Image: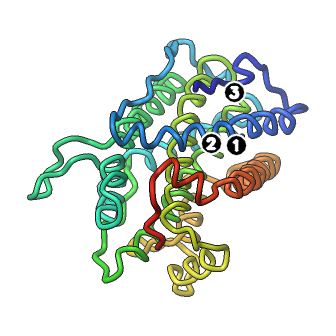
Amino acid sequence: MTIDSPLLHHTPSSSDLQPHLRELLNHYFSIAHLNDRLQDLPHQFHQPQPRPWNSIDWQAISVNQIVGIDPEVFLSILRGAINTEAPIRDYTQTSRQYLEPIDARMARFVGGVVSADGKLLEPGLWEKEERQHTPALLKVYTQLTSEKPIVQPHTVRAYQSVSDPAIALYRHGLHRVATEYGAACLYLWLMAQTTGALHAVLHELLLDEINHMAKFWGFGVWAYPNSSLPRVGWSLLQTTKGRMTYQRDRSSLVGTLDRMTQVLAWQTWSAKNRWTFALTCLQALHLLGRWNRTLTPTFLQDVLGESPCY
C-alpha cells in the first residue's frame, strides 16, 4: 500500500492552515495508514527492504517555499532537527540492547546484526531508513542559505544494564515512541507550511517517522497488553525523579521535551506557530488513541504472533 500526500501541490496560506493541517492529520494518522505500516513489520522481519524516496529536485528548494514561518525560525528548527537526527547509530544500538532480551526480531529490525564482540555487521532497517534524514536536512539547509551548518550531534544516553529487562524496555520504548511521534508531528506541521521541493523533502521525512512510530507503538501494545494510562504515568514519574528538566544521564520524556524546546528554538516561535504546533500534536494524539483502541489482542496476534504478555 502506498500512502502519498493528499495535497502535494497545495499552496498553503495563513488563512487555511488549520483546515490543511487537519486534512493532513486525518490522512497520515488514519487507521488504514497506521495499520498498513504496522502490518508491514513482519514482512520487514523476514525480508527487510528500505523504503525508497521519491525523486527530489534539490536545486529547486528556495526560501520562497516557506509560508507562515519566519525563515530564520525555520532555519533554527532545521539546525535542531539535524543535530537530533545525526546520531542515528547511537539511537539504534541503544534500542537494540534493550530489545535483545525481549524480542530478537525487533532487535534486528532496529539495530541490525552484531557479532559476539559487539561489532556491527549489518545495520538494521530502522537505521538504514533514518540515516537518510540528516543528509537530506543538510542539503535543505545549504540550499536555503548557501552555507553548511556545523553539526553538533545530540549525545545519546548509553544502554544501562538492569535487573528486569521487560521493565527497562517498557520505559525505553515509551521514550522511543514519543520521539518518533514528536518528529512526525514536527515534519507534518512544517510540511503544511511549505511548497514545492521543500514540501516534498518534508513529505519523505514524515513518511519515515510515521512508519517507524506505528511499528514501535504496535509492537509495544503487543508486548505489553496490560499497559494502561496510569502505568504510563507512573513510569514517567519514576524517570523524572522529581526533576522536570533535561538530564543527560537519565531517560525522561519530560526532560526530553524540555531539551527539545531549546534545540528547536521554541522561544523564537511566534504565538501562532506555538499554538498551531501544539494543536497538531494534540490532534495527532487523539487520532493515535482512536487507532490504539482497534489494536485488539486478536489483531496483534495475527500480525506479530503470540504476545509475551509483559
User: How far apart, in angstroms, are the residues tagged by discs 3 and 2?
Assistant: 24 Å
In front: 154, or 191?
Answer: 191
Circle 1: residue type: Ile
Tell me which residue sits at (77%, 20%) in the image. Answer: 10
Q: Amino acid at mark 3?
A: Thr
Question: Which amino acid does the dot numbered 2 rest on?
Answer: Leu
Label located before the other in sequence (3 or 2): 2
| Snapshot quadrant of residue 156 | bottom left
Residue 178 percent location from the top left of the image? 56, 58
Judging by the rendered image, the residue that carries numbered circle 3 is: 194
Contact between labelled residues 1 and 2, with CB atoms less than 8 Å apart: yes
Q: Would you name the residue on which mark 1 appears?
A: 31
- For the N terminus, give its image quadrant: top right
Q: Is residue 244 left or right of residue 148?
A: right
Q: Are marks 3 and 2 in contact (CB under 8 Å)?
A: no
Q: Is residue 306 left or right of residue 185?
A: left
Q: Is residue 80 visible?
A: no
User: What is the secondary structure assignment of the residue under circle 3?
Assistant: loop
Q: What mark, if any, has residue 65 been given in the picture?
A: none
Q: Secondary structure at mark 2?
A: helix
Residue positioned most to the bottom: 242
Looking at the image, residue 210 lies above or below residue 263: above
Give the labeled residue for mark 2.
Answer: 34
**Secondary structure of the residue carrying numbered label 1:** helix
Which residue is depicted at the point 58% across and 73% down? 226
Q: How far apart, in angstroms, are the residues tagged by discs 2 and 1?
A: 5 Å
Q: Is residue 209 above or below residue 304?
A: above
Q: Position of residue 259 (x, y in %)?
A: 54, 63
Q: Is residue 50 left or right of residue 267?
A: left
Q: Which of the two marks, 3 or 2, is nearer to us in this view?
A: 2
User: Crowding at label 3, few (<14), some or many (≥20) Cα neighbours within 10 Å?
Assistant: many
The residue furthest left is: 117
